[in-house]
Image (cartoon, rainbow, N blue to C red):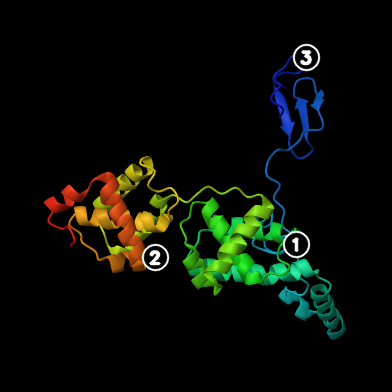
């Protein structure tokens, strides 16, 4: 019943009857049909398959991780096709073949590229929102013709890296290179080209985002992680992080924090986890000690390295 109908306009009675089957509101006292075109705002349960217990309202959600965004249909997928006669069944098989043949070049490219995207994403254990964002970026790149002249794998890797950066999911170019089989320089070059051509604005990576993974891999305590976050915040205020790789400065801060908390790890161990060289760790380590004046604290712990 409409919210504004509270009494009969003819007799003023409030004894109203709502007939939802025909969409009418009737006054029981005088018989006046007050409203005859009610709108049902409830869920419209419909089922087109022979499943009595199914209560689905709509189909699957739209997603960029499928070349047709999940809206397409495929001929001959149902098992009911084998209940037809030989002639009708062969007809559907021919239609199925032509359905694949008449698909556009963009659709064929998307089929292969999105399958590769899912593989790389699964290897890196990326969340669903990153997959969706990367697929959307790849869709735009294909529509703009940015894939032409470049390998599909490199564009997929560049799209995934851009999606990771936008969703603040810390993954390095080395990890993308290992997962996709494309050289690190090529992944970075494609990433910069895509973001520039599509006008995607991405902020610099925050070194703090890399700490949880590094701490987990090195089996360090939560106190050490908190100390590393504190060091990175101080380094940011001192503008020590500007112009330096986020993974290197994050690894160095974690190395210093481990020394301060008597959880010593070697520079080689930290460098392997962070995917940087020992020279990078050593340089960032010295900069942190000098700028933040941590030498005295390390001497007090008797952990100062020669």
Label 2: how many residues lie within 10 Å, few (<14), some (14-19) or many (20+)? some
Q: Nearer the viewer, residue 237 or 306?
A: 306
* 106 vs 165, nearest the viewer: 165
Q: Which residue is mark 3?
A: 11
Q: Residues within 10 Å of mark 1 (few under 14, many from 20)?
A: few
Q: Nearer the viewer, residue 153 or 120?
A: 153
Query: In the picture, which quadrant includes the N terminus?
Result: top right
Element marked by disc 1: loop
Q: Is residue 64 visible?
A: no
Point out the frontmost of discs 3 and 2.
2
Point out the tag, 1 or 2, that comes first from the N-terminus: 1
Query: How far apart are the two marked residues, 1 and 3, measured between alpha carbons?
Result: 70 Å
16 sits to left or right of 171 = right
- Which residue position holds label 1? 145
Residue 29 picture quarter: top right
Q: Quadrant where the C terminus lies?
A: bottom left
Marks 1/2 in contact by CB < 8 Å: the verdict is no
Circle 3/circle 2 CB separation < 8 Å? no
Image x and y of residue 282, in percent: 30, 61
Q: Earlier in the sequence, mark 3 or mark 2?
A: 3
Residue 242 horizontal/vertical position (percent): 43, 48
Which residue is identified by label 2?
276
Q: Residue at x 73, y 73 (%)?
A: 78
Q: On the rendered structure, is 142 left or right of 213?
A: right
Question: Which numbered mark, 1 or 2, is in the foreground of this view?
Answer: 2
């Amino acid at each position: 019943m409409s919210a504004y109908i509270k009494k009969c306009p003819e007799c003023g009675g409030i004894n109203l009857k709502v007939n939802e089957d025909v969409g009418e509101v009737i006054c029981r006292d005088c018989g006046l049909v007050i409203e005859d075109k009610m709108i049902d705002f409830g869920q419209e349960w419909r089922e087109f398959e022979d499943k009595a217990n199914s209560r689905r309202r709509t189909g699957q959600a739209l997603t960029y991780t499928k070349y047709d965004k999940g809206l397409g249909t495929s001929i001959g997928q149902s098992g009911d096709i084998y209940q037809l006669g030989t002639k009708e069944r062969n007809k559907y098989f021919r239609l199925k073949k032509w359905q694949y043949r008449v698909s556009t070049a963009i659709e064929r490219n998307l089929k292969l590229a999105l399958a590769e995207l899912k593989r790389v994403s699964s290897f890196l254990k990326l969340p669903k929102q990153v997959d969706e964002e990367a697929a959307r970026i790849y869709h735009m790149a294909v529509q703009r013709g940015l894939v032409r002249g470049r390998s599909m794998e490199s564009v997929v890797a560049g799209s995934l890296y851009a999606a990771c950066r936008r969703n603040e999911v810390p993954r390095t170019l080395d990890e993308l290179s290992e997962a996709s089989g494309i050289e690190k320089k090529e992944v970075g070059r494609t990433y910069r080209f895509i973001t520039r051509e599509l006008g995607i604005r991405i902020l610099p990576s925050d070194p703090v985002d890399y700490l949880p993974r590094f701490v987990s891999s090195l089996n360090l305590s939560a106190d050490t992680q908190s100390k590393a976050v504190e060091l990175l915040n101080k380094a940011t205020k001192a503008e020590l992080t500007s112009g330096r790789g986020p993974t290197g400065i994050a690894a160095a801060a974690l190395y210093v924090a481990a020394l301060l908390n008597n959880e010593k790890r070697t520079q080689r161990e930290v460098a392997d986890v962070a995917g940087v060289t020992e020279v990078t760790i050593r340089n960032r380590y010295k900069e942190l000690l000098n700028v933040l004046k941590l030498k005295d604290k390390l001497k007090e712990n008797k952990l100062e390295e020669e």
